[in-house]
Amino acid sequence: MPDTQVSQSDNLPDAVTIYEVGPRDGLQNEKQPLSVTDKVELINQLSTTGLKMIEAGSFVSPKWVPQMASSDEVLGLIERTPGIIYSALTPNMKGLELAMQAAVDEVAVFGAASEQFSQKNINCSIEESLQRFEPVIKEATANELKVRAYVSCVVGCPYQGEVDASDVAKVAKELYDMGCYEISLGDTVGVGTPASIIKMLEAVMLHVPVENLALHCHDTYGQALANIYAALQLGVVTIDSSVAGLGGCPYAKGASGNVATEDVLYLLKGLGIDTGVDLEKMISVGQEISTTLGRQNQSKVGSAQKG
Ligand code: HMG
Ligand code: MG
């Protein structure tokens, strides 16, 4: 692999945290629900790669997202590696209660910068969602659980089209002010380019410190790595990704999976940025889950290295 000497003027961080969302964002959109055993196996394998953050499931309505219905079982069966945070989505108090029963290490609420997406995804307006999240964040914090927040549709929405950077900044600020330690900015439909991502990040960074932001790219239009590179130059040091590029969003038709973890790791390794994650091990995990699911590996790096 060609390792490039990156000049200081590129303004890149020394280290980046990879937030692996494959077992949640990836599997929530698979047509065939994966068995509990296979989900547990995936998470156990991911736990050997050096990852520190693994989103292991989602405590949402099983009627809305049946693929995540077994999250309690999965969290009960995985081998927990000390030092790894196993997190889950919790859209309301019911979700938080179930997540706490399953002994998650961290929870995440998820809102949107687009009204229509909010309605389709969580059946309420943006304002109602923020009111709903408030007690979740309070109760989680009182139980010493850190709370992450997602903002979906940060540059585009499948229903509304373009999304204003100021709308993203407003929701991100409210969630940060409510006590979320990190705001993950989701390009849910993967339509962003470095120009729109930079504009959006600059608007959000006026209200939320950049070290408390993460970028969550779906790769529908193949722009994710370029967008991540642009975000790194602005100081973003947490990147969400999904092994083998699994995923999509059940309420964003046409949205493809998250950017593949293997591809992000390859980019970061080439730039000399430390992640603590073993690329070769991640490639093996990606190949195995793709085989289990009977789907093509969406990671370019994983596909290139397939024996
Ligand atoms: P609702 O129908 O308005 O909720 O759904 P409700 O409070 O009226 O309850 C309806 C039923 O759901 C009741 O059951 C509740 O008990 C049950 P019933 O009486 O009909 O039998 N229920 C629950 N069950 C289990 N766990 C819960 C829960 N809450 C209620 N937590 C709700 C509102 C938010 C629950 C629903 O809309 C929902 O579950 N939505 C989830 C949608 C989802 O998971 N989307 C994908 C994740 S977000 C995403 O992928 C984007 C992201 O990756 C970032 C990006 O890419 O942009 C994060
Ligand atoms: Mg997503």
Image (cartoon, rainbow, N blue to C red):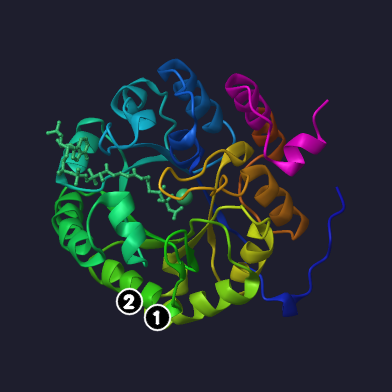
Q: Where is residue 89 in the image (x, y as percent from the top left)?
A: 32, 44
Q: Nearer the viewer, residue 10 or 29?
A: 29
Please tell me which residue lies in front, 263 or 103.
263
- The magenta stretch spans residue 297: yes
Residue interval drawn in magenta = 285-307
Amino acid at the residue labelled 1: Ser
Which image quarter: residue 95? top left
Residue at horizontal 65 percent and vertical 57 percent from the top:
221
Inspect the magenta stretch and tell me whether residue 241 lies in it: no
**Going 63% across and 37% down the picture, which residue do you hit?**
244
Location of residue 177 in the rendering, given as x and y in whole percent from the top left corner? 25, 72
Q: Which residue lies furthest to the front in this view?
A: 159
Percent across and percent down for residue 36 are 41, 19
Q: Magenta stretch mostly in which secondary structure?
A: helix
Name which residue type carries label 2.
Lys
Cβ of mark 1 under 8 Å from ligand 1: the answer is no
Q: In the displayed structure, does residue 14 sit left or right of residue 239?
A: right
**Foreground of the two, 306 or 4:** 306
Task: Classify 21 as above or below 293.
Answer: below
Look at the picture and state if 122 lies above or below 245.
below
The answer to whether marks 2 and 1 mark residues whose Cβ atoms lie closer than 8 Å is yes
Q: How many labels, in total?
A: 2
| Residue named by callout 1 | 166
Tell me where residue 170 appears, x and y as whole percent: 32, 76
Q: Kindly identify which residue carries mark 2.
A: 170
SS under mark 1: helix
Q: Is 260 left or right of 51, judged from the image as shown?
A: right
Secondary structure of residue under mark 2:
helix
* Relative side of 146 to 306, left or right: left
Disc 2: residue Cβ within 8 A of ligand 1's nearest atom: no
Tag 1: Cα neighbours inside 10 Å, few (<14), some, or many (≥20)? Answer: some
Tell me the quadrant of the picture where the C terminus can be found. top right
